[in-house]
Image (cartoon, rainbow, N blue to C red):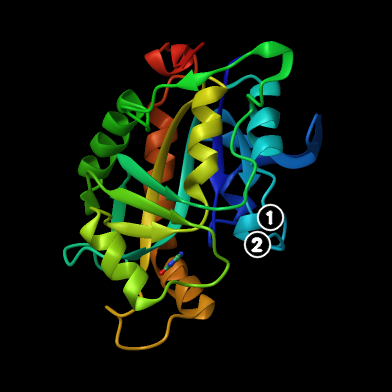
Amino acid sequence: MARLALIGGTGVYDPHMLGSVRDETVSTPYGVVDISLGTFQGVEVVFMQRHGRGHTIPPHMVNYRGNIWALKELGVTKVVATAAVGSMNDAMKPGHFVLLDQFIDFTKNRPFTFFDGEGGLVVHTDFTEPYCGSMRKVIQEAAAELDLELHPKGCYVCVEGPRFETPAEITAYRRLGGDVVGMTNVPEVVLAREAGLCYAVVATVTNLAAGISSAPISHTEVDEVMEKASENLRSLLKAVFGKLDPESSCSCSGGVRE
Ligand code: HPA
């Protein structure tokens, strides 16, 4: 059975969003992964907490390969992910939503592919359109219907973390074309495409990036802004899950080429 999944990042931990929730574990070649299954808008949804139950896993230690493998194993075809981000774009303010359309990868030390050359298989995956175009359309429609402000495009710079950036780094990322900065979207987006999943991200701006903000950045600030935005985010997610068809096919599933 084809299914939909939600990967909840920082601040999206409310399992009460789902009806008839049951917790399960999935064994993968990369270890055991915790997920919850439940209904959302009458559709069965797999809910995964990216940072683990209780937010105990830092961004650079997340088992990205295990997580995506587990979703594939469960028959998931489409994944909506959320992410907290800092903004480097003056138009993208704390509390705003950004529908990512591009990324730049500055991670340094994470397993980032399912294709390590086993069996002589060398794979280069196309990333011209990193996020699923069909899902992005559905998310934009849902936001418009709810009258929610959603920036329709945004370039995500992924850093290794867990520290926040220096102002000099943010100046550099901004010059390169980055709009928002975060610590988790790579390799998640890469693995999703390698696994042939449709994948889109609604990012929530929680703070102005380092050096743009006049104050130091803290995880508490990130959590507080996320909490304030969470009601709108949940409404948006509900509307999106009401519209997505887990059975509809898309070019994302054919994205991997040898
Ligand atoms: N930098 C990196 N990751 C983040 C930020 C930030 O400013 N805000 C939320 N996640």
The residue at which mark 2 appears reads as 58
Q: Within 10 Å of the Cα at label 1, are there few (<14), some (14-19), or many (20+) other Cα atoms?
A: some
246 or 195, which is in the foreground?
Answer: 195
**Quarter of the rendered image showing ligand 1:** bottom left
Q: Which mark is residue 156?
A: none
Q: Is residue 232 visible?
A: no
Q: Within 10 Å of the Cα at label 2, are there few (<14), some (14-19), or many (20+) other Cα atoms?
A: some
| Left or right: 22, with 205 as reference point | right
The residue at which mark 1 appears reads as 61
- The image position of residue 214, as x and y in percent, is 30, 87
- The image position of residue 175, as x and y in percent, is 21, 60
Q: How many marks?
A: 2
- Pointer 2 residue Cβ closer than 8 Å to ligand 1: no
Q: Which residue is at a point 43% across and 41% down the rendered structure image?
A: 238
With respect to residue 99, does 11 lie above or below?
Answer: below
From mark 2 to mark 1, how far is it between C-alphas?
A: 5 Å
Q: Is residue 146 visible?
A: yes
The single residue placed furthest to the left in the displayed view is 91
Q: Are marks 2 and 1 in contact (CB under 8 Å)?
A: yes
> Which of the 4 image quarters holds residue 194?
top right
With respect to residue 19, does 44 lie above or below?
Answer: above
With respect to residue 26, does 238 lie above or below?
Answer: below
Q: Which residue is at a point 66% across and 21% down the rendered structure image?
A: 117
> Which of the 4 image quarters holds residue 75?
top right
Looking at the rendered structure, the kind of residue marked 2 is Pro
